[in-house]
Image: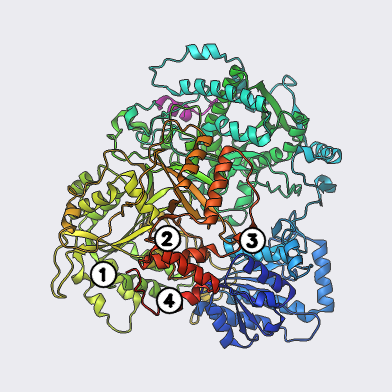
Amino acid sequence: MAGSKVLVLGGTGPVGICLLRELLHRNHGVVVFARTPSKIPEDIASNPLLEIVQGGLTDLESLSTAVSASHTILSLLGPTTTRKFDPTIYSSFYTSLFSLMREHSVRRIFAMGTLSISQPSDKFSLIRLFLVFIVRLLANSAYRAILDIARAFEEAGEGVDWTVFRIAGIPGGSDESAWKKDREEGEAFEGWIGEGGWSVTQKRGALARWLVDAVEDGKERWIGKMPAVGKLKGRLWACGRAGSVIPMFGFNSTEDMSDDSYRELRRLAKKLGISFKNPGSGAPPPEHQETFNLIAEIRNKNLDDYRKDITFKSNEPWRKQTYDRAKWLASRAANLVNQQRNEAGWRFSLENDVFHRFRVEVACPTCRARIWRSEFEAYAKDCDLKRRRDRREPCNCPPEHRPRDSYYDVGENPLFDDRAEELIIHGPLVEILLPKKKPDRIFGLKKTKAFDKILDADRRDGDEASRCSPFKDCNDPLLFPFLIIEAKPEKRSVGFEETQTQTALPIWELLKLQENIRTEVSTESYSASPLVWFFANRGDSWRVYGCYVTQNEPKQYEIMQLWDGCVTEEVNSLQLLLIVDYIADWARDIYRPSILKHLKSTVTEIAYDQVSLSHDSDVISRRSAYPRRHISTWIPPPPIFIDVDEIQDGILSDPGLLKSILPISVPNTERGTLRSASLFESRIFGVRLTEHNVKHLLRFSRGVYRDNEKSETLARTILNLLSGPNDCIAMQGTDLDFFEDSWRGDTNAEARAHTFSNSTTFYMQVEIATFMTNAWNIARELSYIAVSKPALDALISAANFMAPRRTLDSLVQRARPCNLTVLRDTIECLRLGSSWLHFSAAISCTRVSLCSLPVRKRADNTPDTEALGFTRTSQLRMRRIIEQCHKYRKKQPVPKILKPPFGMSKAEALSLKDINPKPEQLTFIRALERTQVITSYQEHNSQLCERCHYVSNGFEEDYRLSMLDEPAISEHGMVLVETLDLTTPGPATKHDLCLMAFDINSEITDSCALSVVVDDLLQGGKIFHTIRHPLPLRYANEYIKDTVWNLPLPYRPVTKNQRQDVQNWSLELQGRDIPTSNNAERTMDYWSNLQFLLFFLSYGLTYEDTCARVEALLAEKCNRSTFYSRELERPHVEGG
């Protein structure tokens, strides 16, 4: 099993010393493997977080000890040019190291290489060519050793998640002052040699910081790769068109632009064919004429005429909403003018409301009928689109079944997303890097299932990101952005001309992105022309531009102004909102289908105008079954739990609407937030193995090399869990479906259970967890592993046990049958309850396993299950098995460099194929999530609850959702919750805060009022404390004895630093300055302190006695490893 520390190899060199300083600075436990430990400075060697293991490259026993204590390895080992050595010594060392890593289940390693290693994705670089020539000439042994290291990773690194980072020079000092200075050296480059921004060197302190960042975020995109690392260059030169030399420069905002920089940008824009067209300076291009004409039509819209068209009894209430929003926007803009707000003030106050339509759903979450339509619908030549628009009907669901009633502005938009102030990576034609200039905001397309399917089929994973997104590669990219926003404050001298100039290159890049996929489509078929929208504003003055590519040669990238207005005037506010609504309609009905058709045409080689999107599962109206189905015939009855489609923070902050989930906007503050206790997420996370899908799971687990040992290990792990001390629950397939559906709040679940039959018996282990997510949402998770009898036999066969297992032979006989009635009673008991009850369970991080009652008294007798009991558990064995099985949904490619296992012939190795699971092969994966609202008639009555009534008659240990008795909800209708912020890099030294609202007092209307609530709750001296889940990796796997579930005494006094953080949040809510904190007080390990506290509290000690124990531990500088070893050897009789 992997350890809890970071292993450093090469830690006695100058770079290694900086790396040790960085790791210890961020409170990481460290093991350093060194031949000469005396080279480590005393201030580092004396740190209690540091462990030293002495040994050389051939001392495998000592190396094994060091590896066993680690979860990640950072290696700075490499050849020297000052002495002779065997070039194979380092490659041999790494080969041995890989074996030890596999033995101790340590998967991640980052190792240093040099520019002598080349990669296929590298671009030509004259400086690299020169440096490698010098090394080969003067230090040939070192050159060969580096190549051997690269070969060792590629050939012997199977089963290890390795990354070799390549760098040439690492200047700087290693003393503490030099490290502190160099670590702030600037942003690091990571990518391929010759790319824009690449440089050959990086300061030692900055490289150390990058490596520790890599430990903390995993850098999964570089697994199995050898990227170059260096300092991100701020001023570069690269070749542009026709071989000309183009300067690369960076600036923060327009006020930072010098005259030279501005002129350079203007010249560059002209060179690239970018031009701005004023209104009336020419006719719009034919391909966009109808689109631009509708914008002109919106210019003629009058507020009075629009108001006359509104009928309040209409089934199209969005029109009244638009009218109200326009009046609110004009009033808010006028206030901002009087307040002389800066750029951030204008953006935070108006931007979300102007572009509101891109963030919310357009269809009712219950009946999928329309809750919004654009006043002006995008021009459509497509007959299919016209038919779909004709079929669209407005939602007729009664208001009492909508969450609080903001008339259906609920749910996150499933098709669009945005990025704020993110760096655009410019294309290879003109490698221009603007490292500090980032567009204020960009809207684009989400990577939905429809895009996933096409991009997976494309099989061009290596350049997918650059083909589809202008941003740095990530797991959830923003695809083909189509709208860009740039804002400036009204009081600055910056004019629209400079705003246009500095946004010209990002617009050009977005147009090129669309143009490039258009060129991949057959020229014999019609395809849509590139179009990007640009919104520029200076305070209350707004402009809207349409950006396109001309059809003539040479191509021009023209940016045409279409509208301008001052939003302090109501008519202009209305027109601006109608334009945004129109663009949202265009993006949904015209642009997004066009992009999908372009990509699908490229993959299938079918002409663009012959591609069909009838099976686009992301849009309900495109599904093939839809045309024959009238909306009124498939509206279900109102559910007890209203599904609000995964409500995000954004929907809670919409002002100017009727009402939302909360009657007050969520404050936009750094130190805390506001949430509703009436919302919770129902999650299902499981594995269901049947006769038909177990073979797929076992095949995927073997990997591309068809390693039977891997499938053996997985099968044994599952069987060991099922045959553990707790009897399995036996459940019919129909009942298991009911279990899942009921957990998600499906009111038709029982009717289906009586209608459909599935007699397959499953043998299960089940756990229920209630906790706070990192977004401060209450989550309740049902996790299970269910195996049918044929699947169980298949697992036993795959496990290949050398001797019979008695527990497996009796597993089926010992399983406790559970019928539908018991399940229904259990689900009702768990799901019903007030907001306070679910909050109490979440704040305590309640985790229970389900067990059959009554308890078995004899081995030869299996009583029927009369109820399901709840037993507290902190073990995560089952969840980790489920996580492993869920990973097999991903593609497993054949390695570029094959290393077949012993016994595999060359012919067999050459015939290996990628493992690319199909959806029908992944039916063993169960992963569902739904956000629901607790209504007032869902109270849990233990006197009426059948399960609670049964359990109360003599069963001592039964933990339902624990009710907290200590505090009452304040008169404000809110409680204050604190947690250590574990999500940000570095040591956990600050607290994140949340006001959890139950029934907010109507007098609380803004952030200033919330600050009064915070101050009042703090005066009581006690607040709620919790731990949010999931924990970051460095905390989750640190010590198995840590208390992270079933937390004791969640309502307790605040500490000095917690009080300071709460007071700072109160000041932030008031808009006041935050006093500078004393960083010296924030250097201790707060996470360890919390674990000490929870350890003693869990043994029943009083809070005062516990604090005294913790103070004593801090005084003796005891670490958790020593503490757990010492304390768990003796009983804790004090306090219980």
Q: Earlier in the sequence, mark 3 or mark 2?
A: 2
Looking at the rendering, the stretch of residues picked out in magenta corresponds to: 378-392
Pointer 2: what residue? 886
Q: Position of residue 588 (x, y in %)?
A: 52, 34
Please state which of residues 1074 and 173 is positioned toward the viewer in this rendering.
Answer: 1074
Please report the residue visible at 53 percent of the width from the left and 32 percent of the height from the top: 356
Q: Is residue 246 above or below residue 527?
A: below
Q: Residue 539 at what x, y percent from top left?
A: 68, 28
Quote the CA–CA distance across marks 3 and 2: 44 Å
Rendered residue at 72%/71% (across/down): 15
The magenta stretch spans residue 304: no
Measured in 3D between alpha carbons, the distance from the residue under mark 4 to the one under mark 2, in whole angstroms, is 37 Å
Per the image, label 4 sits on a secondary structure element best described as helix
- Give the crowd class for mark 2: few <14, some 14-19, many >=20 residues within 10 Å: some
Find numbered disc 2 in the image and state the secondary structure of the residue it sits on: helix
What colouring does the structure picture have? Answer: rainbow
Disc 1 and disc 4 in contact, CB within 8 angstroms: no
Q: Position of residue 504 (x, y in %)?
A: 73, 37
User: In this orientation, which residue lies closer to the viewer: 1000 or 448?
Assistant: 1000
In the rendered image of this protein, does residue 601 appear above or below residue 323?
below
Which numbered disc, 1 or 3, marks the residue that appears first in the sequence? 1
Q: Is residue 703 left or right of residue 818?
A: right
State the residue position of label 4.
1127
What's the CA distance linking mark 1 and mark 2?
24 Å
Mark 1 lies on residue: 726
Quarter where residue 372 is shown:
top left
Q: CA distance from mark 4 to mark 3?
A: 29 Å
Dot 3 corresponds to which residue?
A: 1080
Residue 391 lies within the magenta run: yes
Label 3 Cα neighbours within 10 Å, binned few <14 / some 14-19 / many ≥20: few
Query: Disc 3 or disc 2, which is closer to the eye?
Result: 3
